[in-house]
Structures are given as C-alpha cells and as structure tokens.
Image (cartoon, rainbow, N blue to C red):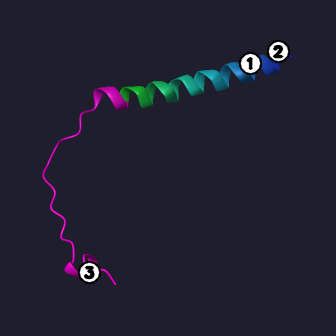
Amino acid sequence: MPSLFRFLTVVAVIGGLIYGAIFALANFVNPKPREMTVSVPSDRFLKK
C-alpha cells in the first residue's frame, strides 16, 4: 500500500508541474501582434 501512495504522490507532483508550466505560459508570455494578409482566389466566391 505505501508504494501506491508514493506512486500517486509522484503522479500528482508531475501533474502539478505540468499544470504550473501551462499556467505560466498562458499568463506571462505575451504574443506579438502583427498584420496578416491572406489572398483568397475569386473562384471561391462563385456559387456552383
């Protein structure tokens, strides 16, 4: 039974580290806004 608790503790710690990394990336990294131009072919507007 102690090995089960040890395993669950290790899984919880690894999960917490992954959650913390995702939280840090979502809140502390700001994307750089930039303009974007997309060319759409005119045949896309024609209905068949």
Looking at the rendered structure, the secondary structure element under dot 3 is loop
Q: Which tag, 2 or 3, sits closer to the chain's start?
A: 2
Q: Is residue 24 left or right of residue 39?
A: right
Q: Nearer the viewer, mark 2 or mark 3?
A: 3
* Residue in the picture at 74% in, 24% down: 7
Under mark 3, the amino acid is Leu
- Which residue is nearer to you in this view: 31 or 12? 31
Image marks 1 and 2: residues in contact by CB distance under 8 Å: yes
Instruction: Estimate how packed mark 3 is, as few (under 14), some (14 to 19) or many (20 or more) residues with alpha carbons within 10 Å.
Output: few
**Horizontal arrangement in the rendering, residue 6 relative to residue 21 (left or right):** right
Q: Residue at x 68, y 18 (%)?
A: 9
Residue 48, given in percent of the width and then of the height, sits at 34, 84
Within 10 angstroms of label 1, few (less than 14), some, or many (20 or more) residues? few
Of labels 3 and 1, the one closer to you:
3
Residue ID for mark 2: 2
SS of the residue under disc 1:
helix
Looking at the magenta stretch, what is its main secondary structure?
loop
The label on residue 46 is: 3
Residue 41 is one of the magenta-drawn residues: yes
Q: Which residue: 66% across, 26% down?
A: 11
Measure the alpha-carbon separation of dots 2 and 3: 68 Å
| Quarter of the image where one finds residue 23 | top left
What span is colored magenta in the figure?
25-48
Position above or below: 40 against 37: below
**On the image, numbered disc 1 is attached to which residue?**
6
